[in-house]
Amino acid sequence: MATPQVASLIILAIVLAAFSLANPNFLSPLNISNMMAFLPELGIMALAMTLLLTAGEFDLSVGAVFALGPVLVMLLAQTAGVDIGLALLVGLVVCIAIGAINGIIVTKIGISSFLVTLSMLLIVRGVALYITQGFPLKSWDQPGFFVTLLAGSFDLGPFRLYTSLFWFIGLTLVCAYVLNWSKVGNWISAIGSNRSAAVARGVPADAVKIWLFITASVLSGLAGMISAFRISAASPVAGTGYELEVIAMVVVGGTALTGGRGTILGTVVGAFMLRAIRNGIVLIGVPGLAFNIFVGAIILVMLILHAMIQRRSVRR
C-alpha cells in the first residue's frame, strides 16, 4: 500500500467523494461525459511526459506542439487542398522533427532540457501564431474515416464518449508495458537514476532520450489533432499552459521529477484527479480562476506524501 500510485489513488477517491457530497450532479452521466471528453487529450500527453521524466528530462514545448500540429493540418487541407490523410501525416512528421531537434540538442550539445524546450516552446508557438495571423481556424467538418477515428463519438448507456478514450486506453497499455516489462523500460529507469552507470553498462542513453523527446512531441501533436476535430476548431493559442498541467499530472501520480522512478498507473490517476478538481470546483461554485490554488495545494500535498513514502522505503 505504501507506493506513490496507491497514495494518489486514495487522494483521488477522497476528492471524488468530497465533490459528490458537495454537489450531487458531480457524478451525473452528463458531467462524467463532459470530463471524459477532455481527459484523454491531456492524458495522452501525460503518458509521454511520464517516460521522459523517468529518464530525467522533461519537455516544456508540448503545449505549443499541441497547437501547431492541428493548425498545420487545417492549413494544408483547407488552404492548399491537400488530402486530409496526407495533411495529418505531414503534421505528425513536423512533430517528429520538433522532438528530434529537442532530443539532439539536449543529448549531443549538452544543454539543459529546460532551456532547450523553453526556447522551442517560444519558436513553435510563434510559428503557429505567424502562419495563422493569430486567428483560429475552422476545423475539418466533413465526415470521414479520419474524423471518426480521432474524434468520433458514441453513446454507452447514459454516457457520451469519444473514440479518443480508446486512444488513451491503448496508449496507456503500451506505455505501461514499455516502462514496466520491456528492456527499454529498464533503460529509461537506469538513465534517470544514474546515466553514467547506465552508459557504462551499454545502455544507448542518447538514442533513448531522443526517441522519448520524439514520442512526447508526436503524442502532443496527436492530442491536439484529436481536440481540433472534437471541437471543430484549430487555434494557435490552444494548449497554453498545458505543459505545466501535464507535468503536474505526472508528478501527482508519483513519478519523480529527478528521474529514475515513473508510474503509468499513477499518471492515469493524476490525470483523473486534476480533471476532477477542475470540473468539481466549478460545480460547487468556486471561481474557475481559483483552479491553480487547488492544483498547487494538491501538488504540494502529494509531493510531501511521496517524499515521506520514499524515506520510509529507504529506511526499510
Image (tube, rainbow, N blue to C red):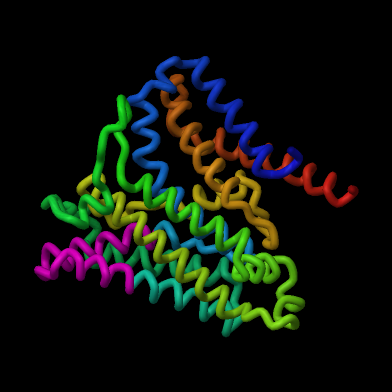
Q: Toward which corner of the image does residue 224 lie, by quadrant?
A: bottom left
Residue 150, percent from left and from top: 28, 53
What span is in magenta?
A: 64-93
Q: Residue at x 33, y 25 (%)?
A: 30
Question: Is residue 83 or residue 61 the one in the foreground?
Answer: 83
Q: Look at the image and say whether residue 70 sits in the magenta stretch.
A: yes
Q: Residue at x 78, y 43 (%)?
A: 309
Q: Is residue 53 left or right of residue 167?
A: right
Question: Is residue 272 or residue 2 the one in the foreground?
Answer: 2
Res. 223 in view:
yes
Residue 33, percent from left and from top: 35, 32
| Vertical side of 96 occupied by 67: above or below | above
Q: Main secondary structure of the magenta part?
A: helix
Q: Quadrant of the N terminus?
A: top right
Q: Residue at x 56, y 79 (%)?
A: 207
Residue 254, percent from left and from top: 65, 48
